[in-house]
Image (cartoon, coloured by chain):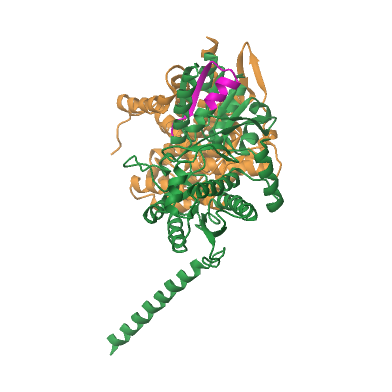
Amino acid sequence: MKKNYQKKIAAFIIMVFMLAIVAGCGGGAKDTGDKAGDKADAINVGINVELSGGVASYGTNAKDGAVLAIEQINADGGVLGMQLNPIIRDCKSTADEAMSVSAALVGEKIVAQIGPLTSGNVAGSTPIMMDNKIPMIAPAATAANVTVDDKTGKTNEYIFRVCFIDPFQGTLMAQFAADNLKAKNAVIYADTSTDYGKGLAEYFKKTFVEKGGTIVGEEGYVKDDRDFRATLTKIKGMNPDFIYVPGYYQEVAPLIKQARELGITAPIGGGDGWDSPDMVSVAGNDALNNTYFTNHYSSQDTDPNVVKFVEAYKAKYNKDPDAFAALGYDAVQLMVQGLKDAQAADSVKLTAALAQIKDFQGITGKMSIDEQHNPVKAGVVIEFKDGAQIMNTRIQP
Amino acid sequence: MLEFIQQLVNGLSLGAIYALIALGYTMVYGIIKLINFAHGDIMMVGGFVGFFSLTIFQTNIVTAMIAAMLTCAVLGIIIEKIAYRPLRNSTRIAALITAIGVSFFLEYVTIFLLGPSQRVFPDTAFPIKAYNIAGLSILNKDIFVVISAVALMLILQYIIKWTKTGKAMRAVSLDQEAAVLMGISVDKTISITFAIGSALAAAAGVMYGVYYSTVNPLMGIIPGLKAFVAAVLGGIGIIPGAMVGGFVMGLLETMVSGYGNSLYRDAVAFGVLILILLIKPTGLFGKDTGEKV
């Protein structure tokens, strides 16, 4: 009798769990965005971005950029005579969630997916897109292995991006140092504890030497270092025209401060790891003069396309668009270009067209998709002037 | 030549910071034979107390440092009472593991309360003046850290050698049971040891923060490790040894970066530690007393 009673309780508990799981599934589908299939002649575009969690600001801004692009296109009559229908879902800044969101979006018959933002979350979503043969355009995933399979070295057929990969910034800065700053001798002082620092340094060296420059010294520091004076004193003795410091702002800010304290006046350059308000508060306005870093985009760009985009974005959202917003916008525009080239709202044809895109004019620069699905495109050089970030120039590779 | 002197200045000021942290390390070890791995994190707490007293209460640097030292002295006493005292009669390894636990606890509680990002000291906290003597760049903060490190070492040496408390500390260090029989309160003496050691860490934390303009919850790990090496180098438990160890460590790192390759800096620094432990296991200043049985 007692045993039977226990069994009943167990069965009851299992039932409660099952109900909870089913209810949970139902809740997941009730996100923002229009239901699929409402409009028969619409092209469903999945937007799988981080709207909550650690990098919610990336996803939110990219979504805003993407939605702006879709609204503009729909107002102009849509693509192939059809309207774009965005289906917006939150991947909660985790790779697991990015995966299940992608699976849900596939069920809603999307033609392509925009997002997620971080390389890790893109990796979560990748297998679903590959299995279902639906292209994904990642706006801002910069890790090299996003579009290329690490094990086989083969390009992931259905994965594209509109941002350049990290190391490419080294190429851009080398061009800037050689052409714009007329530097002949450069020293590289890289964060050797990260792939980011090493990659940028490698590409910088390659391009700078190709341009006829000489690398007179290669030094390194590691994450969490705070004292750089020994190496900087050595660098001062080498008397370089340019110092390349690819790394993150936590280390770069005190590094630049100490360099200036030691009397090094040469221009110093780096990558988008510098982009933080802490640069100015730690290093100070004076020390940062004559320093430059590369980035995807600047809202101060005077290019007419960018000005138009910034105005439209400000009018709609009442804030300045950051790089994520611009890249989100470009991801949608690239997809639209692909649809026009393919002349069909079909995922496989769209994928083939995307891989062939040449000289597409986006907000973040003119880009061509290479065989590894990375865009070959321009970047901007931003200069610190009395503590303010001023766009210096746009560099076309 | 000029470059070499500049490197000496660089090395001395870096070494002074290591020496400051190493002082507290070596003192706690000297008295109760515990490697207090939470020392670097007490330093971090000190750095944050200094930061908040400078920014929120708008105090000057000296007041901030005293506030940090007092707060951390209390923190040190509490940590000892809760975490180390119950383990005083258990194995050394148990106490060591507990110290690592305390270290993580302090780090992640700080992250939980204040967030993981770094905080930036205001420029006004310590206005920087640069002295350029014949092309040599010396900053007032370099002079400040070297002088404070030496001064704190002298004060510490005085307390241990010439005061009654110091005498009690040395007695406890030598033989706890005999000290009890002589009417010395071991608990109280160890509490005072922790208070002083933690106050030293706090002073180092504020100085480190001011020197490099930032504090963050994980800032104590690397300097803590380096200072530990410095303390072992000089002979752990010996106050002047920590001082010299700190300076040797700073100069060594500077010279490797300056004249060798910056990529091998830590490898050489820790390689020297291994060499010293092989050749003279008691450290530069250590006397071979033989193991007590």
Left or right: A7, with B26 as reference point: left
Residue B262, percent across and down?
44, 23
Where residue A34 sits, quadrant-wise, is: bottom right
Q: Nearer the viewer, residue B190 or A314?
A: A314
Where residue A102 sits, quadrant-wise, is: bottom left
Residue A84, percent across and down?
56, 57
Q: Residue at x 48, y 44 (%)?
A: A161
Q: Is A32 contained in the magenta span? A: no
Residue B157, percent across and down?
51, 30
Q: Is residue B220 above or below residue A340?
A: above
Q: Which chain is green?
A: A
Q: Is A178 contained in the magenta span? A: yes
Q: Nearer the viewer, residue A202 or B100?
A: A202
Q: Is residue A166 above or below residue B114?
A: above
Residue A347, percent across and down?
44, 54
Q: Nearer the viewer, residue A88 or A56?
A: A88
**Magenta-drawn segment:** A173-193
Q: Is residue B185 above or below residue A249?
A: below
Color used for chain B?
orange
Residue A11: tell me if it is visible. yes
Residue B240: tell me if it is visible. no
